[in-house]
Amino acid sequence: MSTYVRPLSESERQRLSEFQDMIHYSVRYSTDEYEYRHVMLPKQMLKYLPKDYFNKETGTLRLLAEEEWRSLGVMQSLGWVHYETHTPEPHILLFRRPLATAH
């Protein structure tokens, strides 16, 4: 994960708030070690995200810190980590958390 955390400005938060009700959460699934879920942002929301939230090489979102993904309107219980991006579908955020923290 990036060590750089870039909070959204108030105007950015307001602009993105219209998309929050359109965020979709997958069902959870697990392995022996982790619980996983995918969070799908509305594709049109990507146009309004700050450019520094993107990986310049891949064009996908970079791995976001908890403060950053929560500021986008993603709502999840504690323990989830944005661990991966999916280049063909940059609006999908992949999250996981150790099974020990799953409730």
Image (cartoon, helix red, strand yellow):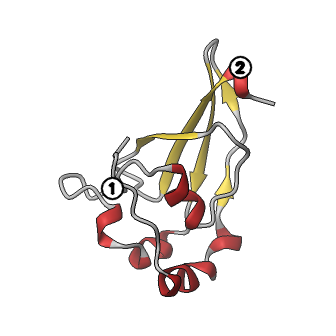
Horizontal arrangement in the rendering, residue 48 relative to residue 35 (left or right): left
Q: State the SS at label 2.
A: helix
Mark 2 Cα shell of 10 Å, populated few (<14), some (14-19), many (≥20): few
**For residue 47, which quarter of the picture?**
bottom left
Q: Residue at x 33, y 53 (%)?
A: 4
Q: Which numbered dot is residue 39?
A: none
Q: Position of residue 76 (x, y in %)?
A: 70, 49
Horizontal arrangement in the rendering, residue 29 relative to residue 41 (left or right): right
- Distance, label 2 to label 1, CA atoms, is 30 Å
Q: In the orientation shown, which residue stands out farthest toward the top? A: 32
Q: Which numbered dot is residue 100?
A: 2
* Residue position for label 1: 60
Q: Residue at x 40, y 45 (%)?
A: 85
> Which amino acid lies under the numbered mark 2 shown in the image of this protein?
Ala
Viewport quadrant of the N terminus = top left
Q: Nearer the viewer, residue 16 or 8?
A: 8
> Which amino acid lies under the numbered mark 1 shown in the image of this protein?
Thr
Circles 2 and 1 in contact, beta carbons < 8 Å: no
Q: Position of residue 46 (x, y in %)?
A: 43, 71
Q: Residue at x 64, y 12 (%)?
A: 32
**For residue 77, which quarter of the picture?**
top right
Q: Position of residue 61 (x, y in %)?
A: 37, 56
Q: Position of residue 7 (x, y in %)?
A: 45, 67
Q: Nearer the viewer, residue 9 or 80?
A: 9
Nearest to viewer (mark 2 / mark 1):
2
Q: Residue at x 49, y 59 (%)?
A: 68
State which tag comes first along the sequence, 2 or 1: 1
